[in-house]
């Protein structure tokens, strides 16, 4: 962990993120420790850890099924703006219909209401970046069958955001509303 912290203490680019992701995967680095680094007090270190977490996790999410509960439990604690994007993106992907059955089964056994609450909070918060709002809205869309009340709330929130929203919000909003 100290070696990783040292590696991400300085600015890194995509090439380095991919290299570190590969190394961590090969070394079977404990994802729990990587998740912890995303809460580092230095927002730059936390961001780099979240970027690596996204890369490691989304390449083979089924490898990390045992860490899903911990990951989901920490989503309400994400404070750094740059980390919210990566957490929201991971949530969007692991709640998709095409995700591995092992992930679906693991998520089925978890209380996802804190995730739902957090996603709505991110959508409502005017300080949250557009990408986070888009990923959060997709996550909520993906969870609409599990929690049927999401459908109406999500539609209302998207319509509200689209009133003065950016091109990204308009595009994602239209897509989700059409699918709802």
Image (cartoon, helix red, strand yellow):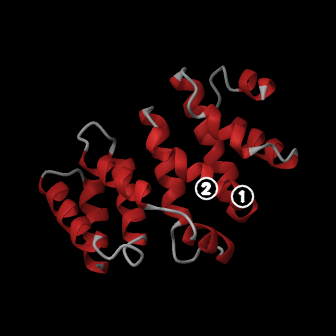
In the rendered structure, the answer to whether residue 101 lies left or right of residue 73 reads right
Spot occupied by residue 125 in the image (x, y as percentages of width and height): 26, 42
Viewer-proximal residue among 12 and 46: 46
| Lateral position of residue 62 relative to residue 130, left or right | right
Measured Cα–Cα span from mark 1 to mark 2: 7 Å
Look at the numbered disc 1 and give the secondary structure of its residue: helix
Is 91 on the left or on the right of 25, as rendered?
left
For the residues labelled 1 and 2, say whether their Cβ atoms are less than 8 Å apart: yes
Task: Mark 1: give few (<14), some (14-19) or many (20+) Cα within 10 Å.
Answer: few
The N terminus, quarter of image: top right
Dividing the image into 4 quarters, which one contains the C terminus? bottom left
Determine which residue is flagged by label 1. Answer: 66
Instruction: Give the residue displayed 55% in from the left and 33% down from the top.
Output: 47
**Residue 15 appears in view:** no
The residue located at (68%, 38%) in the rendering is 34
Residue at image mark 2: 69
Residue 39 pos. (x, y %): 56, 31
Q: Secondary structure at mark 2?
A: helix
Seen in the picture, residue 111 relative to 151 is either above or below; the reply is: above
Q: Residue at x 44, y 44 (%)?
A: 76
Residue that protrudes farthest toward the left in the picture: 163
In the rendering, which numbered label is found on residue 78?
Answer: none
Q: How many residues crowd mark 2 within 10 Å: few (<14), some (14–19), many (20+)?
A: some
- The quarter holding residue 93 reads bottom right
Task: Count every numbered label the image shows and give the total.
Answer: 2
Seen in the image, is 71 located left or right of residue 125? right
Image position, residue 176 (x, y; %): 31, 71
Q: Where is residue 17 drawn, in percent x and y?
A: 69, 39
Q: Is residue 112 above or below residue 71?
A: below
Can you see residue 67? yes
């Amino acid at each position: 962990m100290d070696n990783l912290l040292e590696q991400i203490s300085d600015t890194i680019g995509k090439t380095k993120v991919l290299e570190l992701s590969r190394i961590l995967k090969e070394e079977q680095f404990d994802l729990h420790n990587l998740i912890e680094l995303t809460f580092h007090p230095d927002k730059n270190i936390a961001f780099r850890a979240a970027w690596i977490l996204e890369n490691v996790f989304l390449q083979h999410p089924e490898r990390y099924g045992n860490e899903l509960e911990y990951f989901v439990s920490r989503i309400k604690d994400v404070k750094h703006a740059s980390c919210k994007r990566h957490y929201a993106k991971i949530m969007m992907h692991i709640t998709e219909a095409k995700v591995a059955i092992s992930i679906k089964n693991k998520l089925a056994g978890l209380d996802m209401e804190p995730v739902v609450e957090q996603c709505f909070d991110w959508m409502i918060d005017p300080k949250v970046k557009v990408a986070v709002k888009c990923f959060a809205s997709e996550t909520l869309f993906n969870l609409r069958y599990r929690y049927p009340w999401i459908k109406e709330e999500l539609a209302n929130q998207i319509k509200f955001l689209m009133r003065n929203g950016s091109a990204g919000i308009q595009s994602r909003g239209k897509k989700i509303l059409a699918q709802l």
